[in-house]
Every structure is written in structure tokens, then in C-alpha cells.
Amino acid sequence: DTEVTQTPKHLVMGMTNKKSLKCEQHMGHRAMYWYKQKAKKPPELMFVYSYEKLSINESVPSRFSPECPNSSLLNLHLHALQPEDSALYLCASSQTGGNNEQFFGPGTRLTVL
Amino acid sequence: QQPVQSPQAVILREGEDAVINCSSSKALYSVHWYRQKHGEAPVFLMILLKGGEQKGHEKISASFNEKKQQSSLYLTASQLSYSGTYFCGTGRTQGGSEKLVFGKGTKLTVNP
């Protein structure tokens, strides 16, 4: 199974809502990533988890809160977002150690009203 | 620092060749290539490492010039399925995982 799944596919939320994005993989990867991608732009790294511990936080605002409850799951908790946070949120996973292929999920398209 | 890709866009007829370039003003340790079709997730193509090692799909050809801090992706005898946006990413291992910074992308369109 070389698939990364993400739910939901689409999410519309108000600026006062709290929601969560979910990512799952069963490839035994111990590195998991969150990226943000705006239209016609490249993916931008937000967070990296390695062995379920946060290893990279690219100075992301605290209204985004990642969580890695186990080696297969990655969540992104959203609270008090701004309209400019509307984007495609991609999850990826890879083997640890660097210089490894990252497997991307299909993404969650988020719209903040 | 974000790598620079060129060209920004290229249009080909099926069967034609193309080269996509990626350069960095900083020393490169590795270069990663991904293709993203419209509305889909990025898909891995290749990793090129210092010292000449390559990991990736056999049908893809790429080069890595460490001195010039450049990488090039060669798409030969293009097929319709090659259409998409190609991203190069400069990689750096940190905390046991990979920190990738992607270039702005090169949009490739292959027409019949």
C-alpha cells in the first residue's frame, strides 16, 4: 500500500470555527509532513514529524496546531483561521534519514470565509 | 532559499524534447524533482545527490552539477502524460527528516 489518504477532501470554515485535517499512511514511514499550497505556487513546508516528534516547524502561526498521535496518523488542528489561510493542504510521508521519496496525499482544499 | 527554475513554461508537441533547469545560489546537497498534474498530488520523479548518486524512475533522466549548483531534468520523446508542473526542491536533512524548499515550478504542456 503506497497511499497517503487525507480527509476531508474539501473544508469550508468560518474564522471562529475549530476544525481538523487528518492524514493517514500505512507504509511504515516514520517521517510525516504538512505542506500548504496556494494556487499556482509550489508546496511550502509547514511542519515535519520524525518518529512522532515535531522536528521542524517553519514558523507557522499558532492557529495551526499539528499532532502526531501514532506512527500512521497526522492531524492538523485549525482554529481562528484567516481568509488568507485558504489553500490546499498536503500531507506527505517518507522514510526517515533524508534523501528519500516523499509520498503525497491528494490534499484538503480549505476555504476560510 | 528557494531554487530558481527555468523556463517558467514550455509547450511541446508529442515526441519533442525539453530540458528544465534548477539552480541555487547556495550549495546544493540534493535536488528532488516532482511532477504535479492539475488537481492532483505531487508525484516523485528523482533525487540527485552530491557525489553522483541518483534515486528515481529509470525512464527519467537528470543531471546534477555541484560546482555550478544546478540540476537539469531531461524529458525526451515527450508523451501527453508528461504534461504538468515540474518542481525541483533543494533538500536538507534535519532531525532525521527532509526539509524541502521547492522552486516556483515549470509548467509543461504536451500537445498532440
Image (tube, coloured by chain):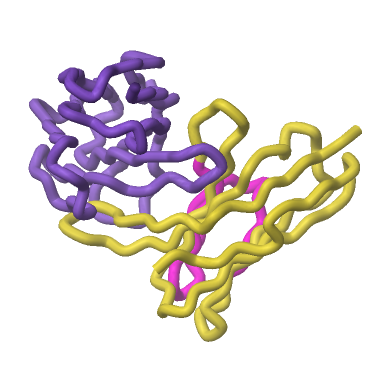
Chain colours: A purple, B yellow
Residue placed most toward the observer, A88 or A82: A82
Magenta highlight range? B44-63
Q: Quadrant of the N terminus of chain B?
A: bottom left
Residue A28 image position (x, y, % from top left): 24, 31
A74 in relation to B42, above or below: above
A31 in relation to A72, above or below: below
Residue placed most toward the observer, A58 or B42: A58
Residue A65 image position (x, y, % from top left): 13, 35
A97 in relation to A47, above or below: below
Residue B27 image position (x, y, % from top left): 41, 79
Who's the residue at 19% across and 54% down the image? A59
On the rendered structure, is A110 left or right of A53? Answer: right
Dominant SS type (magenta)? strand
Residue A109 falls within the magenta-colored stretch:
no
Q: Quadrant of the C terminus of chain B?
A: top right
Who's the residue at 22% across and 45% down the image? A47
Residue B47 falls within the magenta-colored stretch:
yes
The answer to whether residue B90 is visible is yes
Who's the residue at 27% across and 46% down the image? A46
